[in-house]
Image: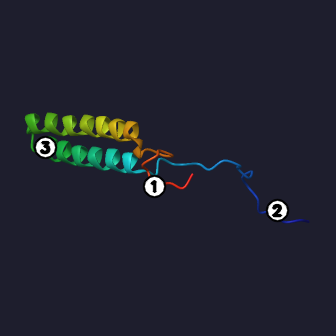
Amino acid sequence: MSQNTEIDPVYTEEIGHGNSIAAWACVLTMIVGTVVAGIAFAYFAWSIVWVGCGIVLLGLVLGWILKAAGFGVGGHRSGASH
């Protein structure tokens, strides 16, 4: 009985997983917006809930702008060696 420990096939291309300045800025901004909205929701502060939702949308726009500026995965300013 042979013991084959290989479960997944070997991939020939690198999977980026969004590990870039653009992705981190996008996600961290969206987390801040979610926390703000969540805390405000718990206190029934509806105007602040909408501010938190706006921060989440700002995170999406920020990620898109940074990706367009070359800070995304494989971008010319991302510091990647590809």
Q: Please tell me whether residue 43 is drawn above or below residue 64 in the rendered image.
A: below
In the image, what residue occupies the spot 10% across and 39% down?
A: 48
Q: Which residue is found at the position 45% from the left and 55% from the top?
A: 79
Sort mark 1 into few (<14), some (14-19) or many (20+) by Cα contacts within 10 Å. Answer: some
Q: Residue at x 70, y 50 (%)?
A: 11
Foreground of the two, 36 or 25: 25
Q: Which residue is outermost to the front? A: 76
Dot placed on the residue nearer the N-terminal end, 2 or 3? 2
> Residue tagged by mark 2?
4
Q: Position of residue 28 (x, y in %)?
A: 30, 50
Question: 74 and 9: which one is in front?
Answer: 74
49 lies left or right of 66: left
Q: Quadrant of residue 58?
A: top left
Q: Answer yes or no: do the residues labelled 2 and 3 have beta carbons within 8 Å?
A: no
Q: Residue at x 39, y 36 (%)?
A: 68
Q: Which residue is mark 3?
A: 40
Q: Nearer the viewer, mark 2 or mark 1?
A: 1
Whether tag 3 and tag 1 are in contact, CB under 8 A, the answer is no
Q: Nearer the viewer, mark 3 or mark 1?
A: 1
Quick one: 36 or 14, which is closer to the camera?
A: 14
Among the 4 quarters of the image, the one containing residue 49: top left
Task: Tell me which amino acid carries mark 2.
Answer: Asn
Q: Reading the chain from its start, which is encountered first: label 3 or label 1?
A: 3
Quarter of the image that includes the N terminus: bottom right
> Relative to 73, is 5 on the left or the right?
right
What is the quadrant of residue 61 in the picture? top left
Label 3: how many Cα within 10 Å (few below 14, some 14–19, many 20+): some
Residue 13 rendering spot, x and y as whole percentages: 66, 47
